[in-house]
């Protein structure tokens, strides 16, 4: 059951309402009924977020910027939600990895303008391939990068078991006179048992390791997105999740018991995603599948006979199909469970994966946010939630409950207090556009810096940098109209800013940072010039010569508004 560890008095629930798989728009508060623990509660907050209405208000692009000049000026209005695409190569067979990449690229060809998306890849570790951007060409490049390429998945290599078993088959055949039907000796029976148990132990280890890596990756994504306000849609391309609640036929109890029971951690991971407003939309990367013997990528296993008569039983079609159906059912059940608990939807048994992504983005960005104030707040207890919508036969997706923490707080994640600087400094996060600015970013060696290379090294972590480095010069012009000036006597105006530059290497690791404060009182003429020409500051940061990115952040302390953008820093010698 989904849980929200709340932290304020208002509980918010996002509700996606669909009819015949299409988002339903235009409902008002009177259509909704909300129940806590079976008792109806009055709805005190109501808001509709409509993706189609938002996308129709696309802004006109500004004048193209000169080379090496960047701006956080928005090209599109704020979207109802941001979207994360997760390419799960850890739990996806190589053939399906190619298919999911093709389908993801197909979706990007038709992405509505203004759709913000980030891309992660999950292998033996989680990688951020591309931070949030509207630029589909940048997203396409990320999907086509080597990091997102096809990776062999040892745990899902269906040829592996067949190869191992075939080797044993050949060895047995050689020792039993070329495969003649002879009774297997006690020592050979012991050997077969040992091989089978070793194989089961290896398979169990692989599944157990994938469970840990998958859940760790999901929790990392939850932590990454926790500093971003509002709804986040996580679109998860995967073949499977290695968790079974019961042993399948032909699986020894010892093998099943050797795998950790991860059902509680799956629950806690779903709770963690839900608590930070992440709705999961699993997309089954294998598409529509057929039974194992009809599918070339599912090789039939070679089962060793322990009947004491003859050699191995080379095929067992019935068992193969049974195992295949069980694995598929387990994968589907887990995906549906995580989707339901986080307020998303699972897309299974379809080859139209691009269309599934489009539907997830559209429905996940068209929702109703409803809220209420609980009458009682018993500490440490769980409260179930139920939503009903009158006026049609609608399908609803929403979170189904929350916990009241030990302090007695009960709010949903949308009411949590977010630190604007924490969000703004996050590598790959969406641009912050409350404070607008333009920045020229030049690296040491650029002809435009001739005679003006900043004196380095610069930055708080410069002593920790390894290998060759170079200086990066930043000239910023802040739009003073987006700042809040305090009025003072004699028509003077006062403002307080803090700014930071944070450098990340090509792997997304923070490698250096610098910052400062801007506290100034302006007379009437200076204020007029600032409003017309902007407020200027200059800074420098030492970065690895191998390149990376620098995140530029301006925080207006008077209004608590933030502007931020991340710009690339190319490796030395690259234009």
Image (cartoon, rainbow, N blue to C red):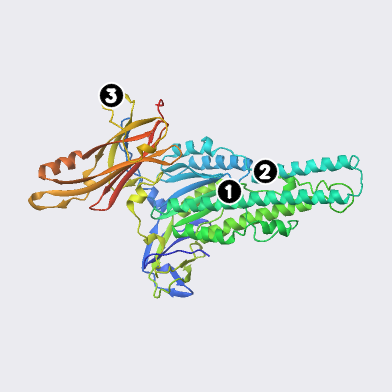
Neighbours of disc 2 within 10 Å: few (<14), some (14-19), many (20+): some
Viewer-proximal residue, 340 or 120?
120
Question: Left or right of 286: which side holds 459?
Answer: left
Q: Is residue 351 above or below residue 25?
A: above
Q: CA distance from mark 1 to mark 2?
A: 15 Å
Give me the disc on residue 95.
none
Q: Quadrant of residue 253?
A: bottom right
Viewer-proximal residue, 111 or 481?
481
Give me the disc on residue 238.
1
Sequence-earlier tag: 1 or 2: 2
Looking at this rendering, what residue extends furthest in the front direction?
463
Image location of residue 125, percent across then percent down: 53, 45
Question: What residue would you read off at disc 3?
Answer: 450
Q: CA distance from mark 3 to mark 1?
A: 50 Å
Question: What residue would you read off at disc 2?
Answer: 157
Question: Which element is circle 2 on?
Answer: loop
Circles 2 and 3, Cβ within 8 Å, touching? The answer is: no
Instruction: Please tell me how many numbered marks the rendered image carries.
Output: 3
Q: Quadrant of residue 440?
A: top left
Question: Which element is circle 3 on?
Answer: loop
Q: Residue at x 26, y 46 (%)?
A: 498
Sequence-earlier tag: 3 or 1: 1
Circles 3 and 1, Cβ within 8 Å, touching? The answer is: no
Question: Which element is circle 1 on?
Answer: strand
Question: Left or right of 20: which side holds 571?
Answer: left
């Amino acid at each position: 059951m989904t849980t929200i560890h709340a932290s304020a008095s208002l509980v918010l629930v996002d509700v996606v309402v669909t009819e015949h798989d299409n988002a339903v728009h235009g409902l008002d508060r009177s259509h909704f009924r909300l129940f806590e623990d079976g008792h109806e509660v009055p709805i005190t907050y109501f808001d509709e977020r409509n993706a189609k209405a938002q996308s129709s208000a696309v802004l006109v692009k500004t004048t193209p910027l000169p080379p090496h000049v960047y701006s956080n000026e928005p090209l599109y209005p704020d979207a109802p939600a941001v979207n994360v695409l997760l390419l799960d190569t850890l739990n996806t067979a190589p053939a399906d990895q190619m298919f999911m990449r093709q389908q993801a690229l197909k979706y990007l060809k038709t992405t509505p303008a203004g759709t913000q998306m980030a891309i992660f890849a999950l292998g033996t570790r989680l990688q951020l391939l591309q931070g949030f951007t509207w630029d589909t060409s940048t997203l396409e490049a990320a999907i086509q990068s080597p990091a997102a390429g096809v990776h062999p998945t040892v745990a899902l290599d269906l040829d592996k078991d067949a190869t191992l078993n075939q080797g044993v088959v050949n060895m047995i055949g050689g020792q039993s006179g070329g495969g003649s039907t002879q009774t297997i000796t006690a020592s050979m029976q012991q050997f077969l048992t040992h091989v089978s148990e070793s194989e089961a132990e290896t398979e169990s280890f692989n599944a157990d390791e994938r469970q840990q890596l998958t859940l760790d990756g999901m929790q990392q994504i939850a932590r990454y997105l926790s500093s971003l306000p509002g709804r986040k849609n996580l679109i998860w391309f995967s073949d499977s999740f290695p968790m079974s609640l019961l042993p399948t036929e032909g699986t020894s109890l010892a093998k099943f018991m050797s795998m950790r029971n991860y059902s509680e951690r799956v629950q806690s991971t779903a709770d963690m995603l839900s608590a930070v407003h992440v709705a999961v939309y699993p997309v089954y990367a294998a598409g529509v599948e057929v039974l194992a013997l009809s599918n070339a990528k599912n090789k039939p296993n070679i089962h060793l006979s322990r009947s004491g008569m003859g050699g191995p039983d080379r095929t067992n079609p019935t068992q193969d199909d049974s195992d295949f159906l069980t694995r598929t059912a387990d994968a589907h059940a887990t995906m549906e469970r995580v989707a339901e608990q986080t307020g998303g939807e699972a897309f299974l048994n379809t080859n139209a994966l691009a269309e599934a992504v489009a539907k997830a983005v559209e429905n996940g960005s068209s929702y109703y946010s409803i809220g209420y104030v609980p009458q009682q707040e018993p500490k440490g207890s769980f409260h179930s939630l139920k939503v009903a919508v009158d006026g049609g036969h609608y399908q609803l997706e929403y979170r189904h409950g929350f916990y009241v923490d030990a302090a007695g707080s009960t709010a949903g994640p949308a009411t949590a207090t977010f630190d604007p600087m924490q969000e703004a400094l996050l590598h790959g996060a969406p641009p912050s556009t409350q404070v607008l600015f333009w920045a020229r970013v030049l690296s040491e060696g650029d002809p435009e810096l001739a005679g003006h290379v900043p004196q380095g090294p610069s930055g708080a972590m410069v002593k920790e940098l390894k290998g060759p480095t170079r200086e990066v010069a930043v000239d910023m012009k802040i739009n003073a109209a987006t700042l809040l000036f305090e009025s003072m006597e004699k028509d003077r105006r006062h403002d307080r800013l803090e700014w930071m530059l944070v450098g990340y290497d090509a792997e997304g690791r923070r490698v250096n940072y610098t910052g400062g404060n801007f506290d100034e009182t302006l007379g009437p003429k200076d204020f007029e010039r600032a409003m017309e020409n902007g407020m200027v500051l200059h800074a420098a940061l030492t970065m690895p010569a191998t390149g990376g990115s620098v995140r530029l952040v301006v925080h207006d302390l008077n209004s608590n508004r933030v502007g931020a953008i991340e710009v690339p820093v190319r490796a030395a010698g690259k234009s």
